[in-house]
Amino acid sequence: MDQKCKRAIKILEQFERLAQKFKAKLSAARLAKLKALRDSGTIQAGDLPARLTRAFPKEFLGMSLAAIRKHCAAEED
Amino acid sequence: MAFFPELVGLPLETLTQAFDSPPSPADAAPAEDPFLWFSEVALAIAQDGEAGVNWLLHHLPEDDEDRLRAVLFALSSVEGDLRDQRRSQLEQFLLAVLADQRPLIVAEAVDGLTALDCADALDRVLPLLAHDSPYVVGSVLRFLARHHPEKARPALLLALKSAEPIIRQNAVDELDELDYVEALPALRRLLNDEDGYVRQAAQTAVSNLGAGKVSGTDIANHEIRNIGS
């Protein structure tokens, strides 16, 4: 899979780990909300703090996790 | 949806007042990390353009770690023509901050140098690989991976063996980012790491790099020996 695809998906799926890596604590309420968005595939980079998304590929801004997965799978085929 | 929707569309004057005020109103974002609030406010100020960048550079909250971190983040996130015009000034500012005693300030400055593509700051950044803080070491690994991949690879392989989970986690992510397939044997060993976040990073890296691409290839030990050379 394309490196930008991998990075975008990693950020949208593993925000809890990445926040800890940057010593930026997400509140329990915020985490619950973000996990629900992630699990439904609707989470977007804009839902996350900018500190976690500085390296987010610009071409995927505004796209949901589900849409990015679909786009990247199609690119791979 | 923005992380703090209440900041969207605010004029510069309101944003600067928010930056100088206590963190987000308790009813709006209870228990949020103050750094996250200030970093979003500072970023919005910087994105206002020249006036916002100047305000941040002249309102450095030296004694407030969360606010200073936020300023470092925001200034190094400036984009477009303004970034090109101010890059040298911002680089000098970030280099000066590398001497700060607070690890998270130093780490933010290194990440800022990475974001501003200051690859020539290598001589100043590389010694920080021996810093006591895992957050500083992590930022140096990110700098190396982005701007000096040939130096990064041996450092990252060595960092996989660090006693600090934050360092192992950073090393795994950057080896994944570099698409360094030769690291797969070492990465597989971290699939059973004692730290859950390291295991998650390793699972992703092993999956991304493609299990089976390397058969019997071990870590490039000669690269480990050449670290920093």
Image (cartoon, coloured by chain):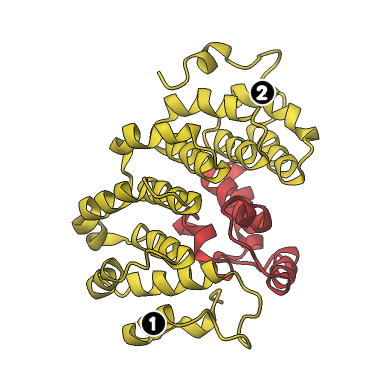
Q: Are marks 2 and 1 in contact (CB under 8 Å)?
A: no
Q: Colour of chain B?
A: yellow
Task: Report the quarter where the C terminus of chain B lies.
Answer: top left
Colour-to-chain, red? A
Task: From this view, report whether residue B47 is shown above or below residue B13.
Answer: above
Residue A70 in view in this figure: no
Q: Position of residue B223 (x, y in %)?
A: 51, 16
Chain identity of mark 1:
B
Q: Residue at x 54, y 58 (%)?
A: A52
The x, y position of residue A54, in whole percent, is 47, 57
Which circle marks residue B134 in the picture? none
Percent coordinates x, y for residue B63 in the rendering:
41, 65
Q: Quadrant of residue B126?
A: top left
Q: Nearer the viewer, residue A58 or B151?
A: B151
- Does any portion of residue B183 appear in the rendered image? yes
Q: Do discs 2 and 1 share a chain?
A: yes
At 66% across and 75% down in the image, what residue appears? B31
Label 2 to label 1: alpha-carbon separation? 51 Å
Q: Which residue is mark 2?
A: B213
Q: Residue at x 76, y 42 (%)?
A: B195
Lower sequence index among marks 2 and 1: 1
Q: Which residue is mark 1?
A: B15
Q: Amino acid at mark 1?
A: Leu
User: In the figure, A25 relative to B165: above or below?
Assistant: below
State the image coordinates of residue B47 (x, y, percent, origin top left): 34, 71
Residue B86: name its quadrant.
bottom left
Give amino acid for label 2. Lys
* Relative depth, front residue between A23 and A43: A23
Instruction: Determine the chain carrying the residue at label 2.
Output: B
Q: Is residue A65 left or right of residue A32?
A: left
SS class of the residue under badge 2? loop
Taking depth in this image into account, of B181 and B143 the one nearest to the observer is B143
